[in-house]
Image: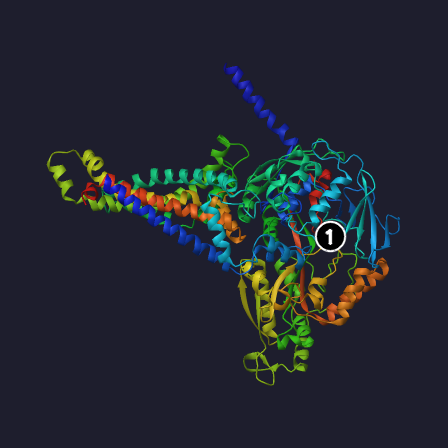
Amino acid sequence: MGAMIGIISRRLLQSALVLLAMSFVVYGLMGLMPGDPIDLMIAADPRLTAEDALRLKALYGLDQPWTERWVRWLAQVARGELGYSRLYARPVADTMAPAMVNTALLMLTSLALALALGLPLGILASLRPGSWTDRLVTVLATASVSVPVFWLGLMLIVVFAVTLGWLPAGGMGETGGGGRLIHLILPGSALALAGLGQYARHMRAAMLAEAGADYIRTARAKGCGPARVLLHHQLRNALIPVVTIVALELGGLFSGALITETVFAWPGMGRLIYEAVMGNDFNLALSGLLLATVMTLLGSVLADFAYWRLDPRVRVR
Amino acid sequence: MRRLLASTLLATLLSFPAQAQTKDELVIGITQFPATFHPSIESMLAKTYVLAFAHRPVTAYDPNWQLACLLCETLPTLENGLARQETLPDGKKGMAVTYTLKAGAKWGDGTPVTSDDVAFTWTVGRHPQSGIASAELYRRIPRVEIKDARTFILHLDRVTFDYNAINDLRLLPAHLERPRFEAAPAEYRNRTAYDQDTTNPGLYNGPYRIAQVTQGSHVALEPNPHWTGPKPAFKRVVIRAIENTASLEANLLSGGIDMIAGELGLPLEQSLAFEKRHGARFNVITKPSLTYEHLDLNLGAPALADRRVRQALLLGLDRESLTRQLFEGRQPVAHSLVPPLDWVHADDIAKYPFDPARAGALLDEAGWKPGPGGIRANAAGDKLALELVTTAGNRSRELVSQVLQAQWRKIGVELRLKAEPPRVLFGETVTKRKFPHMAMFAWYSAPESVPRSTLHSDSIPTAGNSWSGQNYTGYANPAMDALLGAIETELDRTKRKALWRQLQVLYAEDLPALPLVFKADSFILPKALKGLVPTGHQDPSPYWVEAWRWE
């Protein structure tokens, strides 16, 4: 256990350094983008004058070098303040909270659906490699990873909302609870269908890799039934790489899926971060992107922990 | 029990037709969600659209493009004596304009709208750190004089023909906003109740008030019980933001929304395709607007500095055919920067009908002779090859660019096409005059808007003036400068119209930019919705939502 704590401590320290570097790079990239929202505002609104532009740039600090602004932002974050969103004129935390909830709801639903469908399909395909079942699953998995999610989303809308009229075409409904769940079906399904292919493929490959292992042969020789060998021995070991992939997906839980959110008008983190980046809303964009980084790093640490729990060889080493 | 269930089911089924007859809720789809709800902080069309249901300016342009009172009793004019010239303390000429707020005008919490709100709004607008986007109007008003609870006089620091247009004076409720502003003016933009307490009824003075906001998704509006004007027909209006236009269309077809607003809706080509497929179910209304699609020319480029070349380029372009083929003729060809619906529009100016022979002759005269491969070249051997830059991802502009390329090829002009993201185009390329030859984009203005910022020689952006000004072409003509100044100060409408004509004549001769079309807004409405009149200018249709009804 002590070794694991040591590993996790080192990973956390590394993560802090990654976050610092990441914030610098992201701030720099945003700061170096040509133009800023005030320029765009001027181009779009005839009532705004050049004098207004200069006043607004000074007010929002956009006339300062980005390095100075990054240092100020860092000091602010060190004090535990995320600041105000320039675009939404509200505290960053208040702006991000509802979008995070929406995104987590969407991504968890789609992840659960993708795993619930993808893993059994992968196992099924691995049972008889080369059979028509295996080929069918392979075709489905290839289609899943190849079809663009925006096209899939639009097709689902055309079939289930426009033609059949069974489900809403987008948005998240005006009321919570059941209304929200109905609005979740299409975007959740689109993401799940787009994601299940990779889980099916990984599961199939991992299961096949374990199928020829010595311990499987030994288990069979000891008289274990096929179901026990499959579920207790083969699946347990095949899950290790799959768990790693799922853990690394954690970052996506809070960074959202921009295209799906846009197609289904789902107000989540993907769209919020995109608008913040395009609108030079540094506080909001940085917080959103760093949150996604933290979640990815956390997922990586969780994957290590899962390895440690699932694979005794890691503990021995 | 079975009988009870059967009768309940029957009653439910029978109730559907009745519900379809009465429409209490109208769901509108737009492509953007407002970032803020403060009437004057940030400039965003989605916000203007949503607030048009709930918050009325003192004056606005009506659907006939005439200035009208929305929150005042009478539009002040020199003729009715409510406006007069006066001498300012520094000896310059200014104006005093008297307004009286509408009797009975109230905020949604029952508090009357008063002159005190005007004075407070003016204070906020003048404060350099309040975050107000467009402060030009406030800069023009050095003093506000309160006569009584409803009457106030605005003292202007100059004599100008648009003295009574105070469309940018979006009143703020002093009883709610003053404490927030006075506590810390520099923090006001982050503390305003419009963003911290958006559903507070006291923030709205229009026929509706914002009742629910789901960030990024939708805004729901309900009638303002203290509205004293005509009662609006719908008990609830929901405005849903659906950024992707294919999804917006699908939502309309599936019944998720009732209509698509023209102000922030489908691009014209998409709505024309929609009309062909679903015209029997919906009314598709296209309204030519004052959005002026054109090619800004870099007059610093040697080839384009010659007026004959600019004229030849326009003559070599079949704009009538272009708008007919691409937009079914719904976007009128522009001959100058003033749209036909504007009262100062002049029709008797130089026009450039498609005439490739004349275009060729003008290019010959300018020294650009046909060369190898059909591309013209000058005596020095330089080819007449131009670069056109426009916004990436804009399907309509991509198509127009290709038409320009093909048509100009026929008169011996080579056109290279380049597309840039809007942020790069408007943040760098155009604003810093980095486009080598021409840039295609649109100017969005107001009725009788004096184009000082785009045509006056003082407005040419340079490093020396921190790239301020929008005269991106670099056009400098003392005659134009003089006309712009004369129009701004001419109070007599007849004389002013004559000056506007001179400006359009000069513009059409000099062609600092090549006019293409006036863009059209496209509204997709249910057949049963009546009373919605598109405006075609910056004041959106919901300013007259009281007239909307379901029949």
Question: Foreground residue, B25 or A10?
Answer: A10
Where is residue B439? Give x, y as percent.
60, 66
Render colour scheme: rainbow
List the residue tagged with mark 1: B137
Q: Residues within 10 Å of mark 1 (few under 14, many from 20)?
A: some
Give the amino acid type for the residue marked by disc 1 in the picture: Leu
Residue B435, percent from left and from top: 58, 68
Q: Which residue is most to the bottom? A: B379
Residue shown at the point (63%, 58%) measured from the top left: A54
**For residue B37, above or below residue B292:** above
Is there any visible trace of residue A296 in the rendered image?
yes
Residue drawn where x is 69% and y is 73% of the image: B311
Q: Is residue B91 above or below residue A210?
A: below
Q: Quadrant of the image for the C terminus of chain B? A: top right
Question: Picture coordinates of residue B21 (x, y %)?
Answer: 65, 31
* Along the line of sight, the residue nearer the viewer: B302 or B353: B302
